[in-house]
Image (tube, rainbow, N blue to C red):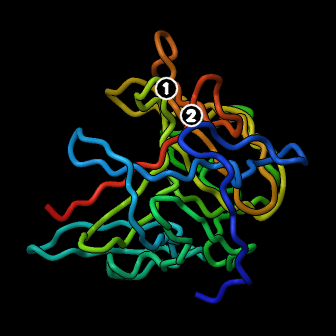
Amino acid sequence: IVLATAFTLSCSSDDSGGPSSSPDGGGSNLSDLPKQMYLFEGDKKERYEGNGDIFMPLMKYKNVHCWSSDGDDVCECTNYDDVVSSCKREDVYDTLQAGNIQNGQIVLNLPKSIDSKYLILRGYFQSCDDKYISCINVVAPPNLMLEFSEGAKVTVTIPGRNDCRARLYMTKSGERTGETALVYASVSGKVTGTRMKTYPGEESSTEDYNLNFSQGWNLIYFYSGSGSDRNVVYWVTDLPTDTTLEWQLRCYDN
């Protein structure tokens, strides 16, 4: 991947807390991310004190559909010009080296910009072309393009282990309350409104957006409501009150 010169996001907090708003009022200050990585083995949690390298997947296609045929994976990929072609599952993503872990502490190293071939026009938040999905007052900059990494999802290589992945979760009193997404935005701007999914035979679900992006990398939070709002997922760029963030590392080689 050809990328612009990268910059280091040095982290200033440790086991708790989360990003504050950036000075211009949009997006998140990623330098405030927690830096301690925690390793999970089943239900057992411990501070990770080792080293490793961090990688982020960048999707090369607008849509990917895969299925099994005679025991083999078959995939169709739709590029950003809406051309459909056959593809291989392992070729769907390019890999960006995004930082490393030093003595259990994360140092992210993200590029200032990424190639436009990874950006989706108007992004995930206005995909309302499906007959079962309707958008209500969804407002977004017309030229907003996004690269969307749900769950701030990264793969990690650490000594002696294979198939390791780290995700950044929202937590409260030690319990998960929501997830995060690391998003690259081509321009600053706000995304507000709701998107409703209504499928036959299923309860309707709603996604409520209150996002304020800065140009560049942003961290957004998404979590489910409770009670009468249990079918609503909220997407915000301000970390909810009394909520902290935690990096959780799991390896799937056992």
Say whether residue 178 is left or right of residue 124: left
Crowdedness of circle 2 by 10 Å Cα count: few (<14), some, many (20+)? Answer: many
Residue wearing tag 2: 244
Asked which quadrant contains residue 87, the reply is: bottom left
Residue wearing tag 1: 172
Q: Residue at x 27, y 68 (%)?
A: 163
Q: Secondary structure at mark 2?
A: strand
Work out whether 185 lies above or below 100.
Answer: above
- Tell me where residue 23 appears, x and y as whole percent: 89, 47
Say whether residue 142 is left or right of residue 122: right
Work out whether 121 lies above or below 150.
Answer: below
Q: Residue at x 42, y 71 (%)?
A: 52
> Do callouts 1 and 2 mark residues in contact (Cβ within 8 Å)?
yes
Location of the N terminus (image quadrant): bottom right
The three-letter amino acid code for the residue at tag 2 is Thr
Location of the C terminus (image quadrant): bottom left
Q: Secondary structure at mark 1?
A: strand
Asked which quadrant contains residue 144, the reply is: bottom right
The Cα atoms of the two marked residues, 1 and 2, are separated by: 6 Å
- Tell me where residue 186 appears, x and y as whole percent: 77, 65
